[in-house]
Amino acid sequence: MEEDKKYGGTAIFFGSLFIICQGLIFYYISFIKVLLENDQTYRAISAKPSVFEKLIYSYLSIYDNIFGKTPATPALAVAIPVSLILFITFLYYIVMYCKQKKRENLRTRLTEAENLFLE
């Protein structure tokens, strides 16, 4: 039954993962300036990339325009979408938790009203 589900712990779990992911994003962004000053870039893996590697490089090119070709760019290319998914999941479970608490409060008020009526 849906009343038995507990959403609070799940919301805390996804919220914690979201905060960790945000920390990683800010950590990598803070080093981009240093990496660009030292002219550190990531290189292609092979001279003839496979279809899978071409797909990865085309995805990374979106972030290359924003962050440059630094070693932090691949990590940011993973962390930013994961962070967005975690944030949406966290919001979903917070809303479900609030709805659950509202139902529990209504149920206890109804029980208290019935007890007052029976007395």
Image: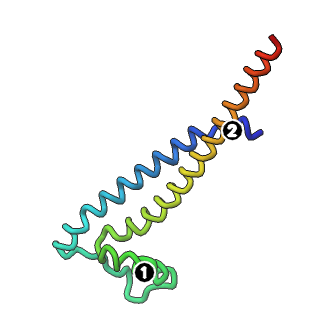
Disc 1 residue type (three-letter): Tyr
Q: Quadrant where the N terminus lies?
A: top right
Is residue 100 or residue 48 the one in the foreground?
100
Q: Which residue is drawn at 70% across and 25% down?
A: 108
Residue 74 locus on image (x, y percent) = 38, 70
Q: Residue at x 80, y 10 (%)?
A: 119
Marks 1, 2: nearer the viewer: 2
Is residue 85 or residue 111 the one in the foreground?
111
Task: Determine crowd level at label 1: few under 14, some 14-19, many 20+ residues with C-alpha closer than 10 A.
Answer: some
Disc 2 residue type (three-letter): Lys
- Residue 5, labelled with which disc? 2
Q: Using residue 2 as the reference point, say whether residue 78 is left or right of it.
A: left
Query: Which residue was labeled with disc 1?
Result: 57
Q: Quadrant of residue 34?
A: bottom left
Extreme top residue here?
Answer: 119
Q: Which residue is drawn at 75% across and 23% down?
A: 111
Relative to 119, is 83 above or below?
Answer: below
Is residue 4 or residue 40 the one in the foreground?
4
Q: Quadrant of residue 63?
A: bottom left
Q: Quadrant of residue 105?
A: top right
Relative to 3, is 63 above or below?
Answer: below
Secondary element at image label 2:
loop
Residue 101 locus on image (x, y percent) = 63, 35
Q: Residue at x 79, y 20 (%)?
A: 114
